[in-house]
């Protein structure tokens, strides 16, 4: 059976834990290696990952490039407008067939959840979701890895807080709160709460997500504080109104003072006005370590999808 990596809620918790453990071991083993040095076991020698971006990307693009290289494989990146993708006389099913013929894995960053689902039906190679409107699984699994690395504790023992807009990253964080059983508190304005189907899924899996429209209530007692850009690149909203609605939700030193004394701040980048420079560049912030860990965790995600995870 092909192992796709599309949505964290559909992947068994034991598999997610296996990926994190593998990433931990591989990261330690790379201590004295250069950026493009291949891991000693060369597990993906001769394998090709095809990457396609319909949306702008810097961290996902670079981290997957390094991930497959360090595992001994190679990658080719194609732009969406260079493929037929159901337009120009070739069906999506036929495009999937071609991708499966030439490559061993396909990473897609897309503005359509339906497209990923369609591809997964027709591909005979694994597909990895590099970001879609409803989820960002590679980012969030890497974030779990980072939290445990920094705190040296299982995430189930920590209070996690999200301050900001309800988006694809938060959806994936909610999925992991079910998979890894951790406390998750969300602070966002009234009209920006997570979609009902996301909260209903969590409830169905016996998970209560605490949502507050007051950032101070949300951040109290937090070990880890997450955020993301409030106005994202493709937001089709009144941006000025949205920024105004989030005015009291900026993560600054005053708001951080309500979290635990040694609370850690994480942000998946790019950033906007949702966090002050003082917090983002301060000693509680671990955003650069968080960004680098994408490489390590994505290597183990690739091994999982390629059936090579020991």
Image (cartoon, helix red, strand yellow):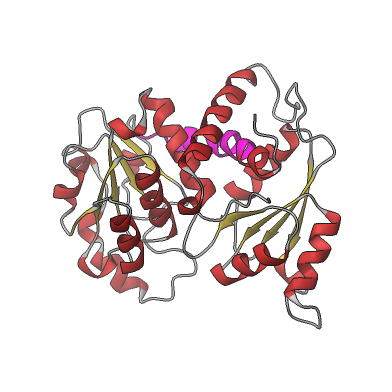
x, y percentage for residue 151? 36, 25
x, y percentage for residue 104? 78, 49
Q: Main secondary structure of the magenta part?
A: helix
Q: Is residue 230 above or below residue 294?
A: below
The quarter of the picture where residue 51 lies is bottom right
Number of residue marks: 0
Q: Indicate left or right for 88 with 158 as reference.
A: right
x, y percentage for residue 186? 25, 52
Q: Quadrant of the C terminus?
A: top right
Which residue: 20% across, 67% down? 190
Between residue 54 and residue 137, name the one nearer to us: 137
Which residue: 75% across, 26% down? 37
Q: Is residue 112 visible?
A: no
Residue 125: say if magenta. Answer: no
Q: Is residue 205 visible?
A: yes
Residue at the top extreme, as displayed: 32
Which residue: 75% across, 58% down? 124
Q: Indicate left or right for 201 with 247 as reference.
A: right
Please provide the residue range marked out in magenta.
Answer: 285-300
Between residue 269 and residue 162, name the one nearer to us: 162
Between residue 309 and residue 105, name the one nearer to us: 309
x, y percentage for residue 173? 39, 49
């Amino acid at each position: 059976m092909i192992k796709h990596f599309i949505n964290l809620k559909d992947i068994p918790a034991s598999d997610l834990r296996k990926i994190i453990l593998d990433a931990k071991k591989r990261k330690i083993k790379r201590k004295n290696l250069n950026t493009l040095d291949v891991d000693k076991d060369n597990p993906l020698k001769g394998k090709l990952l095809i990457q396609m971006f319909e949306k702008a990307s810097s961290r996902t693009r670079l981290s997957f490039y390094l991930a497959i290289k360090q595992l001994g494989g190679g990658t080719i990146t194609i732009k969406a407008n260079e493929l037929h993708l159901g337009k120009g006389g070739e069906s999506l099913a036929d495009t999937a067939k071609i991708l499966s013929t030439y490559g061993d894995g396909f990473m897609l960053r897309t503005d359509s959840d339906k497209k990923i689902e369609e591809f997964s039906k027709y591909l005979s190679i694994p597909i990895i979701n590099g970001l879609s409107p409803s989820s960002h699984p590679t980012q969030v699994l890497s974030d779990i890895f980072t939290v445990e690395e920094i705190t040296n504790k299982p995430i189930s023992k920590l209070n996690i807080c999200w301050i900001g807009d309800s988006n694809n990253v938060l959806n994936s964080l909610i999925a992991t709160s079910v998979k890894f059983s951790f406390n998750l508190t969300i602070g966002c304005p009234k009209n920006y709460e997570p979609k009902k189907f996301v909260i209903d899924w969590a409830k169905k899996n016996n998970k209560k997500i605490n949502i507050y429209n007051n950032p101070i209530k949300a951040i109290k007692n937090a070990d880890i504080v997450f955020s993301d850009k409030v106005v994202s690149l493709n937001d089709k909203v009144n941006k000025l109104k949205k920024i105004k609605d989030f005015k009291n939700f900026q993560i600054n030193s005053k708001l951080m003072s309500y979290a635990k004394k040694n609370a850690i701040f994480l942000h998946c980048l790019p950033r906007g006005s949702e966090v002050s420079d003082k917090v983002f560049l301060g000693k509680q912030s671990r955003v650069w370590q968080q960004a680098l860990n994408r490489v390590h965790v994505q290597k183990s995600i690739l091994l999982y999808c390629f059936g090579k995870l020991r």
